[in-house]
């Protein structure tokens, strides 16, 4: 219920990247090598049609056909299986490890210049004060 003076916000839909196959999603997400076969084995036979990774890259999601909802999640430490009309179960993975982060895109020249201008100043390793542009500490020289 919205009271006078309040603004009702509808949550924005989560940004996702969809993949043609679980194999493509696994390759993009980059889990530890030891977890790849157990992930494949866990989701084999699960009734899913869509595979996605959210913008947060926290998991791989598996969606049922025809908008039936999520039927599974691949997490860093386990696979959560939630088949439609079936029991939920968790399958632990051999290595509890986050996926390999994707490399950052190279910065444009303007963005690199801005980032350099915003970089914290160099600090003297002896007295921990900010160094001047010369790089020589005026207190410790």
Image (cartoon, rainbow, N blue to C red):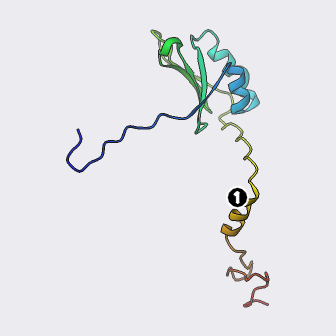
Specify whether 8 is left or right of 14.
Answer: left
Residue 34 locus on image (x, y percent): 74, 28
Task: Out of 85 and 25, give the one closest to the viewer.
Answer: 25
Residue 133 locus on image (x, y percent): 76, 81
Q: Dot 1: what SS?
A: helix
Q: Judge the density around disc 1: few (<14), some (14-19), many (≥20) Cα neighbours within 10 Å.
A: few
Task: Out of 35 and 7, give the one closest to the viewer.
Answer: 7
- Rendering quarter of residue 96: top right
Name the residue at 63% across, 17% down.
42
Q: Is residue 40 above or below residue 29?
A: above
Mark 1 = which residue? 111
Which quadrant is the N terminus positioned in?
top left
Q: Is residue 31 visible?
A: no
Disc tally is 1
- Rendering quarter of residue 110: bottom right
- Rendering quarter of residue 131: bottom right
């Amino acid at each position: 219920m919205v009271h006078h003076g309040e603004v009702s916000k509808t949550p924005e839909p989560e940004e996702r990247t969809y993949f043609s196959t679980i194999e493509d999603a696994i390759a993009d997400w980059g889990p530890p090598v030891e977890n790849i076969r157990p992930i494949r084995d866990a989701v084999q036979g699960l009734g899913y049609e869509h595979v996605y990774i959210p913008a947060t890259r926290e998991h791989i999601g598996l969606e049922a056909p025809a908008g039936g909802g999520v039927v599974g999640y691949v997490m860093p430490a386990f696979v959560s299986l939630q088949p439609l009309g079936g029991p939920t179960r968790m399958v632990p993975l051999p290595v509890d490890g986050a996926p390999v982060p994707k490399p950052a895109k190279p910065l444009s020249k303007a963005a690199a210049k801005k980032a350099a201008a915003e970089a914290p100043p160099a600090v003297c390793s002896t007295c921990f004060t900010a160094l001047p542009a010369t790089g020589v500490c005026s207190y410790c020289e």
